[in-house]
Amino acid sequence: MMHSLSLNGVTVNFPFPPYDCQKDYMQKVIECLQKRVNGVLESPTGTGKTLCLLCSTLAWREHFKDTISARKIAQKLGGEEMFPDTPLSSWGTAATDGDKPAYYTDIPKIIYASRTHSQLTQVVNELKNTSYRPKVCVLGSREQLCINPEVMRQESNHVKVHMCRAKVSTRSCVFYNNVDEKSTDKDLVNSILDMEDLVKFGNKQKACPYYLSRSMKNQADVIFMPYNYLLDPKSRRAHNIELNGAVVIFDEAHNVEKTCEESTSFDLTPYDVVSAISAVDKLLAEQAKEASSKDSVTPDFNVESLNSGLKIEIDTIAKIKQILLDLEAAIDSYDVPSDKGITKPGIFIYELLERAHLTYRSKTAVCEALDQITGYLAGQPGIFLNTSGLQKLADIIQLVFSGEPSEKDRQQQMQTNTTHFKVHIHQDTSTNKKKQNTDVWAQSTAKKQGNILSYWCFSPGFSMQDLVNQGVRSIILTSGTLSPLSSFTSEMRIKFPVCLENSHVIERDQIFVSVVERGPDGVYLSSAFDRRFVPENMSSLGNTVANLSRVVPHGLLVFFSSFTLMDKNLEFWRANGHADRIENIKPIFVEPKGKGNFNEVIDGYYNKVNDPASKGGSFFAVCRGKASEGLDFANTYGRGVIITGLPFPPKMDPRVILKMQFLDEMNRKKNTEVKYLSGQEWYRQQAFRAVNQAIGRVIRHKDDYGAIFLCDQRFKSQSAQANLPSWVRPYVRVYDGFGNIVRDVAQFFRVAQKMRPVVEKKAPPESCGTVCSSDTQSSGFTSCSSSQSSRAQKAKVLDAHLPSLKRRRLNDITGAHGMNKICIEYETEVHESQRRPANLLDALEQGDHRNGEEDDAAGEEKAHRLSTMSLQHDKRMDDELRGGKRKIKLVQEQKVSVSEVVSEENKASKAKKFLAEMKKSLSQVNFERIVQALQTYKKNDDLDTLLAVTMVLAEDTNTHSLLWGFYQFVRPHHKKRFDEKCQELTGRGCGYVPDHSLSKDEKKALMLHSAKDGQHSAVPSSSSSGASACNQLNTQQLNKGGNHLSQQGLRETQTGSASKNEVHSTFLADVRKTLGAERSAQLFQAIRSYKTTDNYENLVTTVVSLLTEKEEDFHLLIRFGVFIRSHHKKQYKEMLGSLTGQSLTDSDVAVSEDQQTGASSSSCLKTQSKISSFFSS
């Protein structure tokens, strides 16, 4: 039941009676909206910020609409009252908007922006818990929403964009063609859909989710989007976001500052320029070749005559190449010291670009030419050309030459554009070194060291001011950690009349905050540059963490300033026994640097905390890392958090140095209108912002409790404490001795556990890696409610539906062992139903826990091992010792029959709804005639008669959808003809594909045939002894000699293992030499996934993206056929043919040996020999 309350004259419906801090928050939101001003609102995690934001904003919007209605009624009544007891004046005055009359068209749209789509998913689900049902829309990119397989197969995002546009313009995308029809679907229009829901709807209806979301945007009351869509001018233009009169909300706004600066900055590398030149070169060569093949070429020869896709002259293409070469020469003309770069004022960018003939006069022509070239190259069949360099140049021109000033105002515009920027030229130290260019045009620059041109923005206010200039009504920035507000608002360069630092919903007995000035040994703790690696300091910090781990129950979080600092301390603690002391009480789980095995590590931590037999676990992470930003450590998962120091940005980083210099310069200008931070103030602010974000990981709802330990003597100062969140400051205590801290915190937890006992340890509220909104538990403030669990689960699986959010784990095992495993996996595939796995890798794929007494002991051993650095190896050993999953196979015929029943039910339901809709739309006479014709068609199979009667639906555009809907009643052998007739009469077909012409029996036969083929291809080698010999792994090599992997349960390594490993090492070396470590790891992951899922599309998408970027790598793509299973061989051969433009024979494409039945026991070694031979050649 909803609870209603009145705030500032606006009635707000809330899911439960709100707390005082929630009322204060909603009141401030409504104040911003009513007064048309901006606001900065900080409210701690767990106070229901998102729910309050949604309810107050939507309540105000409804009130705004009601007051417009009141004014219109008053005008018609001429001053009389409609309801004597309720005068119209009491309806509110929001609609007057000052003296400006308001109309329904003036009702503002709400643009709700957060950092990621995962967070937006949780916001949308929070909206579903309210009584408000606005029309909503979630904006995403093609990468996230496109469902066209051909487009999604492209690796490069801008190639996807151009390919999509080409298909849309020619109406060759079946999904786009269905958008108009499906955009009015009630399930779409009347529902609150998040991105996952939209993708599901698109797949179900065969309609493009990307263009559906764009069509929904025009009618939406609330538009959800990541905030880079708003702040990046390119994205804003691409999504056609109208801001005039809109209310803009930035949730999780502690990252807005960084996004503002990055969205208007760029780094142009030598690789970007060279790739652009290379792409233009290929186009010139192609066009020159075509031109020379013509009998006669006129002086004004136009490429359009050769290819209608390219509408620019060949001279223009040559000019673009000359611009690129001149730009390369201009950037490389500076002799830059290797240790530092050259810095110039922002306006210098115009001088530099002018040397490459890029000016306000030429910008339009150059951008049009670049767009034409990029679009043409992206749409070409065959080997993919890297056009990212061309796209980046076009983006740079749009950014630098923004605005359309007249000749006399141009200098002023340039000055305004570059006030908050610096140009920095520095040496390229990346692995993408500039290739030697043999082109005579580029000989002068071919031997020079490549430089990077950086154009950096140092004021987030540049983007904020741009939003204000677009005419927004209000901008609201909100987060759990914005303190200190004064410095935050001064950075934004716009006024924020409404500010709030909200209190928390917790009581005094739920939080313990202490400054730990000295460790147990009396040594002062500090992470300052000159103290951080001093042995006494590291030892004292280790003792502090070890002792606190004894008194903090369950989960303990330890945050370091950087990965370097964490690694150094852990190394010292392991060498000196501190780590063992911590490990014995709370096993250590360490946040990995990459995304690789983060999920596995955090799951291990959750499992250890949940283990009733354990004393919990400790999770070591870094400030500004993944764990500090997005994860929810509610209840037992985060009873204590230790901050080991102040995470200042790296002071020698060029961007940090220039940012501080920029702020100091601005302060010296004595600008009275805008108060800037000093460079030192900004530097300090960044450290405390990161600390506050890490602190926010604990105490996630009103019944939670936890302790915060600030382990750095610098936290003792009043100025440092003033930068902490307002809800933390009142509870900060500075202790003289460490013993007093232990005493008081032990007492704190004894009291807290008595007052708020934990009944039992439950499964974690969400899986690892979920990027959580800080307000997941806002509704009702309980972290375990079923609705919240489902929302967390939905956010967890979001990345399974969105390509851009998919986890791409890189295999952590580098060197020969990682790729050796793939060879072994593919040479000896073991039948899935086999209970005991043949080797460690199959154990990883099949592993499951057996029931029995062993399970408890083994589970405890597993949780302990997961906390070590050998986490992945040990997990696989554990699975190996337990045996494989038992899988129940369903008979194929049963599957078909079940799906048949479901399909028939769905068809019947759909047909019933369609006829009901048709009855509403047509007259009684026409409806009866059409139904009669349908019954006649069912009896005599006469399509012509049916067409004659249904043609009445083609006469009115409003009934075209009914004509298209008749497609479902047309029999398979008539569907093609009916589709063609609809195309002729309405200009649009019904989405016919050849499969639609198959009868039910033909489809069933095809399914059974496919199923048999699939079963046949999955039959393992008949020689199990041969498979066994190949399946053995040298575990001593796998764990690099570590004694943490038991040899129990593994058969002895067979003779010849060393020679096989040598073959695999040669293979790996060849691939790694070509692709590099990270990209070869991606290939490795794709092969493993293919083995498990048999998903050919996913495999080919990855492989093609990795092996077609350079022509010299193309032979690897052909040879990769050794991994392709026999039932996919034909598809793979056809794809290779289309990419190379040549017809390939079976002998050209290798086939995976593991698909050959009846192979001899030596087949494994033969396959290894094949792999080795052509990867080492």
Image (tube, helix red, strand yellow):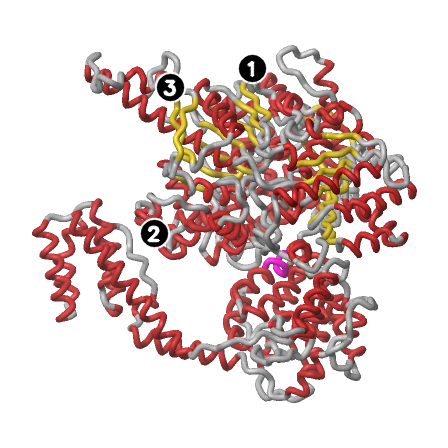
Q: Amino acid at mark 1?
A: Lys
Residue 94 is marked as 3
Of badges 3 and 1, the one in the foreground is 3
Amino acid type, mark 3: Ala
Label 3, residues with CA under 10 Å away: few <14, some 14-19, many ≥20: many
Q: Position of residue 1176 (x, y in %)?
A: 74, 71
The quadrant holding residue 463 is: top right
Q: Is residue 1107 magenta?
A: yes
Q: Is residue 1172 above or below residue 328?
A: below
Main structural element of the magenta stretch: helix, strand or loop?
helix
Q: Position of residue 638 (x, y in %)?
A: 67, 46
Magenta stretch in the rendered image: 1105-1109
Q: Is residue 752 magenta?
A: no
The Cα atoms of the two marked residues, 2 and 1, are separated by 50 Å
Q: Residues within 10 Å of mark 2 (few under 14, many from 20)?
A: many
Provide the residue designation for mark 2: 178
Marks 3,1: beta carbons within 8 A: no
Tag 3 near tag 2, CB within 8 Å: no
Q: Which mark is residue 408?
A: 1
* Towards the viewer: 723 or 119: 723
Q: Are marks 2 and 1 in contact (CB under 8 Å)?
A: no
Asked whether 123 or 668 is in front, the reply is: 123
Q: How many marks?
A: 3
Q: Earlier in the sequence, mark 3 or mark 1?
A: 3
Secondary element under disc 2, as helix, strand or loop, is loop
Q: Measured along the vertical axis of the image, is residue 108 above or below residue 393?
A: above
